[in-house]
Amino acid sequence: MNQKALGPMDATPARSLRFLLCDTAGKVGGLSSSDEAWVSSPIQCLDKAVDAKPGLIVIRIGDMPFRERDTLVELSAALKRNPHTRNCPILALLHSMHRKLLEDLNRAGVGFVKFIGDCTLDSDQIRQIIDAMGPHDRLERYLETVCPFVHYRQIDSRHEMVSCGAYLDRMVLGGLRLHELCQTIGHLHCEYYLNPRRKS
């Protein structure tokens, strides 16, 4: 882990770093050390973070209903508002790239993100993720990577339609175009990004 990149964690050696993991889906294979803690709800996370003062708070946001996802975003904001936890860095483990979620997490004060899919994690894997953290994992970097014209329209409690705001939301995005252009720095060369349509 690049300690200089993480700021508030500079004083703690990587291998002795204490972390608190909030995973409401329960996809954790077990934590093996007394300096690691796992909780399954936002309330437990807030309470534990205040009491234990972890060096890092890890919040897993998987493929879940939007209401549950929004609750975890609000947890991040609450941790950053709380005087006991506001200086603790937060790492969000995300299911997939999502521009609006990144924007919400950025407003909430989350500093770092990793994209891990839907896999079950164990203590060693979480440690490896933390040890590898660096400037490339800063949330702002991903906001620069994903096209700001990617828009989301909710269909039901856990599904959305993704569209191109630069094309007046008349183009549905998905497949290779979304993953290989709209969600990469390549969007800077997209004809719609360079010349967005305007409503008449």
Image (cartoon, grey):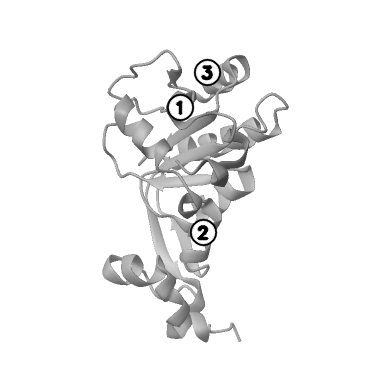
23 lies above or below 100: above
Residue 99 in view in this figure? yes
Give the residue number, with chain letter if any, for mark 1. 22
Residue 82 placement: quadrant: top right
- Binning the other alpha carbons within 10 Å of mark 2 as few (below 14), some (14 to 19) or many (20 upward) gives few
> Are the residues at dot 1 and dot 3 in contact (C-beta closer than 8 Å)?
yes
Question: In front: mark 2 or mark 3?
Answer: 2
Kind of residue at badge 1: Cys
In the image, which disc is placed on residue 44?
3
User: Picture coordinates of residue 191 (x, y %)?
Assistant: 44, 86
Rounded to the nearest whole Å, what is the CA distance between mark 2 and mark 1? Answer: 24 Å
Rounded to the nearest whole Å, what is the CA distance between mark 2 and mark 3? Answer: 30 Å
Rounded to the nearest whole Å, what is the CA distance between mark 1 and mark 3? Answer: 8 Å
Mark 2 vs mark 3: which is more N-terminal?
3
Question: Is label 3 in a helix, a strand or a loop?
Answer: helix
Residue 121 left/right relative to 12: left
Kind of residue at badge 3: Gln
Question: In front: mark 2 or mark 1?
Answer: 2
Kind of residue at badge 2: Arg
User: Picture coordinates of residue 157 (x, y %)?
Assistant: 41, 43
Residue 170 in view in this figure? no
Instruction: Name the residue nearer the viewer: 181 or 157.
Output: 181
At 46% from the left and 32% from the top, the residue drawn is 14
Instruction: Name the residue nearer the viewer: 61 or 122.
Output: 122
